[in-house]
Amino acid sequence: MLNHFKTAILLGTLGGVLLVIGALLGGQQGMTIALIFAIITNFGAYWYSDKFVLRMYRAKELSVSDYPRVHQILNGLCKKNKMIKPELYLIPSKNPNAFATGRNEAHAVIGVTEGIIDLLTEKELKGVLAHELAHIKNKDMLIGSVAATIATTISFIATMARWSAIFGSRDRNGNIFSLLIISIITPIVAAVIQMAISRSREFQADKIGAKLAQDAKGLASALKKLEQAGKGFPMRFGSEASAHLFISNPFKSRNMLKLFSTHPSTEERLKRLAKIKL
C-alpha cells in the first residue's frame, strides 16, 4: 500500500512539473494547454506503448516450437496464479534481459532477449518471468508509460525553451529567467522523479514475483547473473528513455550516478529478496 501511495505522489509531482512549465510560459492559458497535451500524450501511451516498444527493440513473436521451455515455464506460472498468459516476444540481443509491456493483463506482452534465454537455468528464468508477471499484475506498464510520456514531454519542452533562450526569446513577462529554469532545472527534476517511480516498482515486482514463483532464490540468482553478464553485452539499439521497462538496465554504465539510475542496486534487491517470507 505504501508503494502505491508513493507512486501516486511521484506521478502527481511529475504532472505538476509539467503544469508549472505551462504556467511559466503562458500563465493560466499555458497550464491549460499543458494539461490537455499531457492527457493526449498519455492516451497515446496507454493504447500504443506496447507496439512502439516491440518495434523499437525489433521483437518478434517467440515460437513455441523453437522455445518450448520458455512457454512451458510461463504456462505453469499463469495457471498456478490464475493469470492470463501474456504473449511472448523475442528480442535479438545478447544482452540478458526481459520486460513487460501492454495496457492491461488481457493485452500484456513479455519480451525476453536471446541472451537471457541462453544464460539462465530453468529456475532462474522462472524467477524472471514471475517478476514480469508481477509488473503486469501491479499494472506497472501503465504507470511506466505515463511517467515516461510526461518526462519525455518535459524534456521536449525544455529543449525548445533552451533554443528559444539562445535566440533571444522571452517569456510572457518579458524576461529570460523562466526559460533558463525550464531548460536546465525541470528536465533534471523530471528525471529524478521518473527514476524514483521505476525503482519503487522494481522492489515491489521482486517481492510479488517471488511469491508468484514461490521461490525467491531463483530470481536472486538470476539478478546476480544479469548484473555480471549485462556489463559485457550492452543493448546496441533501443532508447535509454525506456530502460525502466527492463528487469535490469540494458544500457547501464559502471559510472552511472545512483541518483539517475533507473533501477535499484542489485545488492539492495538481493537483501530484500532474502527477507521475503513465502
Image: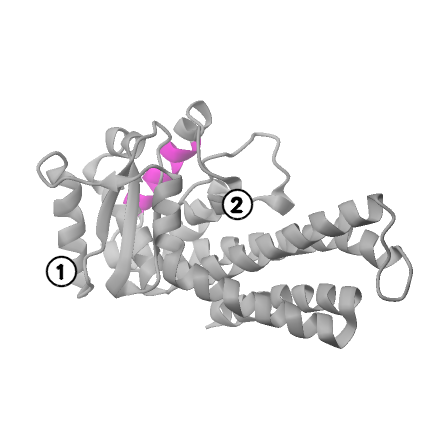
- Label 2: few (<14), some (14–19) or many (≥20) C-alpha neighbours in 10 Å: some
Residue shown at the point (46%, 27%) measured from the top left: 231
**Three-letter code for the amino acid on which mark 2 is drawn:** Ala
Name the residue: 75% across, 69% down: 23
Given this view, does label 1 or label 2 mark the residue nearer the observer?
2
The residue indicated by pointer 2 is 241
Label 1: which residue? 79
Question: Circle 1 — which element?
Answer: helix
Between 104 and 228, the residue placed more toward the observer is: 104
Seen in the image, is 41 located left or right of residue 270? Answer: right
Say whether residue 252 is left or right of residue 139. Answer: right
How did the renderer colour the structure?
one colour
Using the image as rendered, state which of residue 182 and residue 44 is in the foreground.
Answer: 44
From mark 1 to mark 2, how far is it between C-alphas? 33 Å
Q: Quadrant of the C terminus?
A: bottom left
Q: Residues within 10 Å of mark 1 (few under 14, many from 20)?
A: few
| Overall secondary structure of the magenta section | helix
Q: Position of residue 37 (x, y in %)?
A: 58, 66
Q: Are marks 1 and 2 in contact (CB under 8 Å)?
A: no
Q: For residue 190, which quarter of the picture? A: bottom right
Q: Residue furthest top?
A: 232
- 256 to 73, vertically: above or below: above
Q: Indicate the amino acid at tag 1.
A: Lys
Q: Which residues are magenta?
A: 217-227
Q: Determine the residue positioned at 28% across, 31% down.
A: 114
